[in-house]
Amino acid sequence: MAVCARLCGVGPARGCRRRGAQREQRREGPADSEPDTDAEEERIEGVRLGAGEAAAPGARAPLSLLELPPELLVQIFGSLPGTELPSLALVCSTFRRILRTDTIWRRRCREEYGVCENLRKLEITGVSCRDVYAKRINPRVKSGRFMKILPDYEHMEYRDVYTCLLHRYRHILGLWQPDIGPYGGLLNVVVDGLFIIGWMYLPPHDPHVDDPMRFKPLFRIHLMERKSATVECMYGHKGPHNGHIQIVKRDEFSTKCNQTDHHRMSGGRQEEFRTWLREEWGRTLEDIFHEHMQELILMKFIYTSQYDNCLTYRRIYLPPSSPDDLLKPGLFKGTYGSHGLEIVMLSFHGKKAKGTKITGDPNIPAGQQTVEIDLAHPIQLPDIENLRDFNELSRLVLEVQEQVRREQQEESARQDEEDSHLQQEEQPAQREDAGAEGTGAVATQASAPTSQPFVLPSGVISRNEDYPRTCRMCFYGTGLIAGHGFTSPERTPGIFILFDDDRFGFIWLELKSFSLYSRIKVSFQNAEAPSREAFDDMLKNIQSMTT
């Protein structure tokens, strides 16, 4: 009970002894001392006393919040959103004292942002401090250097962590696409321990499309001193150094490095290139015999190294899903010939499915729609022997392409006629016809075999020979191709092959090339679109930046 009295001055009975003594002192007259309660507390107490006087003798007056035990108020306040607590502190001095309890803010940090670390434990056990840094931040730095950069946990409070770090930078949590010309990228900003860290996700080394994603930290934010958040750039090989973050608007922010000399290596640009090549491709330049591929790699290094000091990021959302989708939408890794592996977002739009590049290349930049699948036009593959014949597969796809072209012409002509001559009573009948057509497409998909043999036709190039040998179904689609610098872009026919819930492929007829896509199995937080319209607007925005 002594703890309760120190926290807020309220006891377990009707009011506290201290407040009762002050009322008794006021009845006796001389009271020059400053009252312990503020005006709001007196108002609440007056309401309670008034209700008690009006009640029958011996009746229990209604309780007010001020009469509740402090530990119960801590539980109540801890269940409220952290954004509401500052307003609650303005009610009265008792509430203000209660809200200084760090248990409340620790709960808000845990429930709203997933912070599970114990500040006091981190301070007492130095090993835990080093683990936080070594495991999550910079494994190349030796453990003996960590004590020099540890925050002052002894004098830090969860209220400071919440207000000065988590709440202040909450708008940058989630998925982002950096503006690195045609190359793009995938940045995931998360709360990791007592840090906010921006992780750049990289595809596995070409052509191992089924391998897990790689990632490296680009920046981190944490509290080095109470009420002061520190931004540090993690680029380079010399450890964290001074950086800056500017939140331009809700869906855009930028980072800047203030010590770019930390990005340079003693061996100059040649050493930087060799190190980058090992990290990006997992090999040396001598291992790459294709001359065109060497040129593309060198071009990417020169271009991306210009952005090592300042970057702008724009928010991206994961695609919304529906029970009627052919497979779960999301992010996939795909093979793109000499360009290596790239990240593609698969989303569904009625009878269409779209693959949008999150990372790109000089031919088809990030943000562009790389493939489009027509779910209303399934393709039945021939038997395995005929499937090996590229001309046979090409004939099937071109027949469907011609059918789609005729349907589009008929639809356009029908629409023109409807705009000029169609009567109001004929419109419901046309809607019924369209509904019947959609039902037929679904029935065709449902009637497709659950599994059928698959093999790539002879002459089709694949970066990965370890592709599935069975598939579920196939659909007509188009792929976007262009010259260097995204010149003369055009959509060419192809075939979409669904292998299973996590893999699909696309055969580019004109290029005689095969791309294999594998799902990125990472649970991204704060990445759901607030609405379907917001997701569609996001797709348009990232596409317009590279058009």
Image: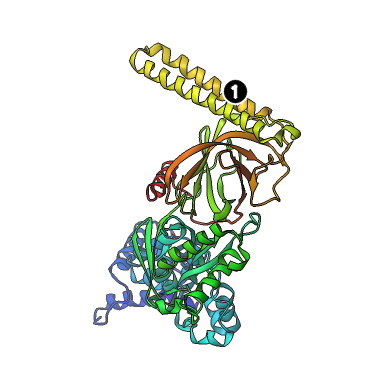
Residue 157 visible somewhere in the drawing: yes
**Looking at the image, which is closer to me, 33 or 249?**
249
**Looking at the image, which is closer to me, 105 or 309?**
309
Residue at image x 49%, y 42%?
Answer: 480
| Image-based side of 350 in relation to 542, left or right | right
What residue type is disc 1 on?
Answer: Gly
| Image-based side of 68 in relation to 53, left or right | right
Q: Provide residue 122's location: percent of width, then percent of height.
A: 55, 80
Q: Secondary structure at mark 1?
A: helix
Residue at image x 50%, y 22%?
Answer: 406
Q: Which residue is mark 1?
A: 440
Residue at image x 58%, y 24%?
Answer: 439
**Looking at the image, which is closer to me, 425 or 216?**
216
Specify the quadrant of the image occupied by residue 306.
bottom left
Q: Provide residue 149's location: percent of width, then percent of height.
A: 48, 83
Count how many numbered circles sit on residues in the image: 1
Dot 1, how many residues are within 10 Å of its Cα: few (below 14), some (14-19), or many (20+)? few
Residue 69 visible somewhere in the drawing: no
**Above/below status of 448 relative to 369:** above
Specify the quadrant of the image occupied by residue 230.
bottom left
| Image-based side of 409 in relation to 512, left or right | left
Q: Provide residue 221's location: percent of width, then percent of height.
A: 44, 72
Q: Provide residue 126's location: percent of width, then percent of height.
A: 58, 84
Specify the quadrant of the image occupied by residue 512.
top right
Q: How is the image coloured?
A: rainbow
